Amino acid sequence: MLLKTFGWSFAVTAAGLAAAGLLWGWQGLAIVAILSILEISLSFDNAVINAGILRKLNPFWQRMFLSVGILIAVFGMRLVFPVVIVAITAKLGPIEAVRVALNDHERYEHLVTSAHPAIAAFGGMFLLMIFLDFLFEEREIQWLGPVERLLGKLGKVDALSVIVSLVVLIIAATTVATAVPLHGGSGTVDKASTVLLAGIGGLVTYLVVGGVSGFFEDRLEGDEDDDEADGAPRPGKSTGAALGLAGKAAFFTFLYLEVIDASFSFDGVIGAFAITNDIFVMALGLGIGAMYIRSLTVFLVRKGTLDDYVYLEHGAHYAIGALAVILLATIKYEINEVITGLVGVVLIGLAFLSSVRRNRLAAVEADPAAKQEVTSGV
């Protein structure tokens, strides 16, 4: 099971480190290894969130997530996307943007860093919407008890997540975006309009991709309920149409997963400049880390970990909320990537320990003889 799920990750790691050693020597190998660890630590909560979504899909789309999805994650988000951002923000042609990325590493770093306010606003708002929709949803299993029950009741207010997100965006645009330090510390610049526009873009992207995916999922569930009630498929309802509907739902869910991954990758790409500004070294290191996040996601799904440790999703969503706030704060302030990674790890760790304790208490109720294990354990 372990080798089957992580086999490609192990193979890519070995090939990537070997390539780094041959092309850039021991220093390059060390940088790639550090970037891989950085990406895994920053995106561990991403794996838990992805697993919660991916378990709804069939094995075909899970394989797509590991194959096509990893190509998008590695080459799209870690290699192509930063160049596209440079081309757009610096108003460069595609060829010139590629030339800068390949031959002028310092200018490339400067241009990507200058685009950080827009990137952080887009990704921050997208992640904030994921967190708020989770927070304001009534659910049977609750980690923080009274707090989550209250928030679930507040969630009955229409579009509350959107309202809160827009308020947060306005606060960010009028505070952290008003005096953003220039790269190199040579002054400040007002990025309020940029942050507002990019933040609204992130909000709209979430609503469109999540809304379309939810629409097809609801349609599919409705058709299945109708068929169960009738005892047979409805007249005129072909198997091909049903499969097409399932395919649409799965496709947009897959697209939603990719946008989530993109939002998580922003801080990793920006943080990587503290280690290197070589685009290929950066893409290789972050790409290896992304492979492990993909494999970990599938591992969690196949092992049923989220069903066994029910608070993991809660911890991951709280980590997403923290990351969204951190991303918005980094528009103006420099926050060490270690802090960002530790916040997620600590929250998920606490959720895991709470899940273990819940399982042991449940075992006591089922078998009083297990009480001794609970009192002597976590």
Image (cartoon, rainbow, N blue to C red):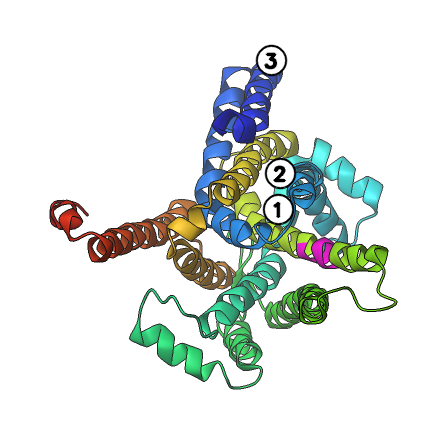
> Which label sits in the foreground, 2 or 3?
3
Residue 149 image-quadrant placement: bottom left
251 in relation to 9, above or below = below
Circle 1 sits on which residue? 110
> Which label sits in the foreground, 1 or 3?
3
Cα–Cα span, label 1 and label 2: 6 Å
Dominant SS in magenta: helix
Q: Is residue 28 visible?
A: yes
Circle 3 sits on which residue? 22
Q: Residue 315 location, x and y as percent?
A: 39, 57
| SS at badge 1 | helix
Please state which amino acid type lies under the numbered disc 2: Glu
Is 44 on the left or on the right of 11, as rendered? left
Asked whether the residues under the numbered discs 1 and 2 touch, taking CB atoms below 8 Å apart as contact, a structural biologist would say yes
Circle 2 sits on which residue? 106
Of 59 and 313, the residue lying toward us? 59
Residue range (magenta): 249-253
Please state which amino acid type lies under the numbered disc 1: His
310 in relation to 189, above or below = above
Cα–Cα span, label 2 and label 3: 24 Å
Q: Residue 86 location, x and y as percent?
A: 71, 49
